[in-house]
Amino acid sequence: MSKNVDKIPYKIYLEESEMPKAWYNVRSDMKNKPAPLLNPGTHEPMKAEELAGVFCDELIKQELDNDTPYIPIPDDILNFYKMYRPSPLVRAYCLEEKLDTPAKIYYKFEGNNTSGSHKLNSAIAQAYYAKKQGLKGVTTETGAGQWGTALSMACAYLGLDCKVYMVKVSYEQKPFRREVMRTYGASVTPSPSMETAVGRKILAEHPGTTGSLGCAISEAVEVATSTEGYRYVLGSVLNQVLLHQSIIGLETKAALDKYGIKADMIIGCAGGGSNLGGLISPFMGEKLRGEADYRIIAVEPRSCPSFTRGRYAYDFCDTGMVCPLAKMYTLGSNFIPAPNHAGGLRYHGMSPVLSQLYADGLMEAVAVKQTDVFEAAETFARVEGILPAPESSHAIKVAIDEALKCKETGEEKTIVFGLTGTGYFDMVAYEKFHDGKMENYVPTDEELEKSFQLLPKMD
Ligand SMILES: *Cc1c(COP(=O)(O)O)cnc(C)c1O
């Protein structure tokens, strides 16, 4: 390990006492605030009272708060975090050596808990506020299953009921995910289902559909709003979720600062934008305040390219069009992506916060090919020892590409990327890759255009 002269440990851990005690709200530093959620009927900004049937009260406050920079993390949540946080920031010495690059690569590893991803950071916060409000339970959707698993764990811990609508393709591809959720006491229904009015409607229009996050959201919202003592919780996209996930970025920044390391670029995969939004938030804050500059890169699958081929427009967050309208980069709420193997990245829209930052030129985005992603995943697994989730491997792919560019130019750039989770439940996908049966589906312009035609008409 010739490069170990840096005296940076393989894993930079923070002490418990060095953990952030407040979440950081990047909206407070944005000159152009993310566009407000709109009532789908009146097209007026949603008021807290209107959201109260769907979301918990405290979470609505966080959702609508564009001004408070730091929001204290309640002690009960902080104590739960301490079971699996602070998460390590790892110096990828072995990957650097394998690539023979002068670049310095770090990754923030969020797979170190049973749910296997960063989603637990927001699940515990959302379940905590539901419990505090005296609710009986929560409903939600899950794509690949990581969010449902995280929420099941959080609800089991707090004694809340948890109803999960799981995208059908994942329900079938990942039976063990379902069993983990049931182990934590959640009920799990494949979506679209015949249990809800919106599910029956979607099935009538698209018989045989393998489902999408957009469908599952519609079902979960319908059940929450029609069941006494229940609210709906969402694992990504919303401002409140990015707020909770800022713990990732705050810890990353604290760990880098501890060793005087300055990142040049920060890379993350983007499904609904929560891990990336959380990882970049304190760095973006510095950028917005003019204190520092970073290249920030969102990575998405070519099969579901919201940033790189989507429209920046008001759209429904769900397929059933029961949710408020959000202004975001979107492929259209009618777009049902091909069943690729990164379930967590199969969402038609994108966080309104990240969408605004992208529209303002403060971050970049690239779309990558599925087989390239798995090739990068394998390279990484063989040298760094962690079996990465397919979602996370999108970030690995671009981190490797950037490190190889450094090799050409001889630049010693510091690359930080988010390793959002582990891939143990994704071995069917790895199997397809190994057997050469993995497809690289890319939607055509016509397909996207058809979906854009159905975007809500705004006046
Ligand atoms: C859900 C998920 C993602 C994508 O969701 P974001 O909200 O964009 O972060 C990425 N990686 C893993 C492991 C996930 O579970």
Image: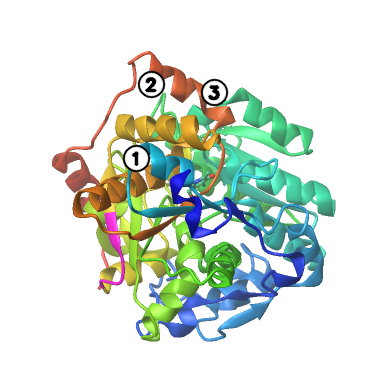
Instruction: Name the one closer to the observer, 31 or 318.
Output: 31
Q: Amino acid at mark 2?
A: Phe
Indicate which label's residue lies in the foreground, 3 or 2.
2
The answer to which quarter of the image holds residue 374 is: top left
Q: Amino acid at mark 3?
A: Glu
The answer to which quarter of the image holds residue 245 is: bottom right
Query: 159 left or right of 5?
Result: right
Q: Secondary structure at mark 2?
A: helix
Q: Is residue 250 magenta?
A: no
Q: Which residues are magenta?
A: 361-365
Task: Mark 3: give few (<14), some (14-19) or many (20+) Cα within 10 Å.
Answer: some
Q: How many marks?
A: 3
Residue 423's disc number: none
The CA distance from mark 1 to mark 3 is 37 Å
Residue that carries the numbered disc 3 in the rendered image: 172
The answer to which quarter of the image holds residue 53 is: bottom right
Q: Residue placed farthest to the top in the image? A: 435
Q: Quadrant of the C terminus?
A: bottom left
What residue is rendered at 58% in x and 66% in y?
Answer: 255
Residue that carries the numbered disc 1 in the rendered image: 99
Question: Which mark is first along the chain, 2 or 3?
Answer: 3
Q: Position of residue 311 (x, y in %)?
A: 24, 58
Q: Position of residue 30 (x, y in %)?
A: 40, 82
Residue that carries the numbered disc 2 in the rendered image: 433
Question: Which mark is first along the chain, 1 or 2?
Answer: 1
Task: Mark 2: give few (<14), some (14-19) or many (20+) Cα within 10 Å.
Answer: some
